[in-house]
Amino acid sequence: MTVKKPIQPSFDEKSCRHILSLSGGKDSTALALYMRDRVPNLEYVFCDTEKELKETYNYLEKLEVHLGKAIQRIRPDIGFDDLLEQRRNFLPSPQVRWCTEYLKIRPFERFIGTDQVVMYVGIRADEPHRKGYISTKPNIHARLPFVEDGLRLKDVMRILEDSKLGIPEYYKWRSRSGCFFCFYQQRREWVGLLETHPGLFKKAMKYERKDPVTGEMYTWVQGESLSELADPKRVAQIKADYEKRRASEPSVLKEASLLSVFEMQCSGERAGCVICHL
């Protein structure tokens, strides 16, 4: 007996909502500029965890001017602090990314509801390792314009430069958008947070806990608390180790920006939650 393949549901793109979810990062921002005149009815949204860097909010405000359209803020039903309390202070991690689910994905899918949606994702043609957030909901149809059109990192940077928008200020010391305490940060980036936003660094420190029963430490960085990382001698060591790694990179990267170097070092499927960091 021949088994028939299930019929794929058809949809009319003209009658769909067209949505581009921004993270405050370079790729989704460049995609918004790239698609601005291609899809007139495009909706721009930002899933706000309310734990973002001020540079991210400032960048989104500048982008709104370039787009000529407001970016809709989507906020979760329950905030990070309440979620953390429910989880007995068990911090999110690359293995258990409950923050992404509750602060980004669920609010986004609630915002969409049952509407037929074309979702535009800013994965580039030179990122075969990145799968991105592509919902399994049958009413969400993903499009990857940069992949379809063969646009790479250099093209993204050109779009941002040509628009005069440039890249967010946090790229001077950080490789990603997302919460200020993102567990995907490298140690060198935690040092950047310490030096750029010491108040936020202290807030991140306060989230770390020691289990009174087991003695286990819940820390953002595996095997090291932020109080240990903030020690001046440790900071100096982290910076020296980073420069040593950078010196060993191919010569083309030796004069590169932090963004370029971090992007090289962070390549890989576990480099971050794509819905947060594009």
Image (cartoon, rainbow, N blue to C red):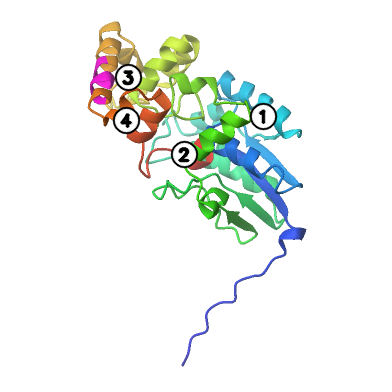
Q: Is residue 139 above or below residue 265?
A: below
Q: Nearer the viewer, mark 1 or mark 2?
A: 2
Furthest-bottom residue in view? 1
Q: Residue furthest top?
A: 232
Vertical placement of 13 versus 170: above or below? below
Mark 1 and mark 2: span between their CA atoms? 19 Å
Q: Say whether residue 244 is magenta.
A: yes
Residue type at mark 4? Val
Specify which label sits upstream in the sequence, 1 or 4. 1
For the residues carrying marks 3 and 2, which lies nearer the camera in this image? Answer: 2
| Distance in Å between CA atoms under marks 1 and 4 | 31 Å
Q: Which residue is mark 2?
A: 153
- Look at 33% across and 28% down and name the residue there: 253
Residue 45 drawn at (x, y percent):
67, 38
- Taking the image as shown, residue 213 lies to the left or right of residue 198, namely left
The magenta stretch spans which residues? 240-245
Q: Is residue 23 visible in this depiction of the protein?
A: no
Closer to the camera: disc 2 or disc 4?
4
Element at label 3: loop
Image coordinates for residue 107, horizontal then vertical, percent: 63, 41
Residue tagged 4: 252
Look at label 1 and name its amino acid. Answer: Leu
Q: Where is residue 35, by image quadrant?
A: top right
Residue shown at the point (39%, 22%) measured from the top left: 189
Report how far apart the C-alphas of labels 3 and 1 lie in the structure.
36 Å
Dominant secondary structure, magenta: helix
Of 205 and 274, nearer the camera is 274
- Residue identifier under label 1: 63
Do residues under tags 3 and 2 come within 8 Å of each other at their CB atoms?
no
Is the residue marked by circle 3 packed among few (<14), some (14-19), or many (20+) residues within 10 Å? some
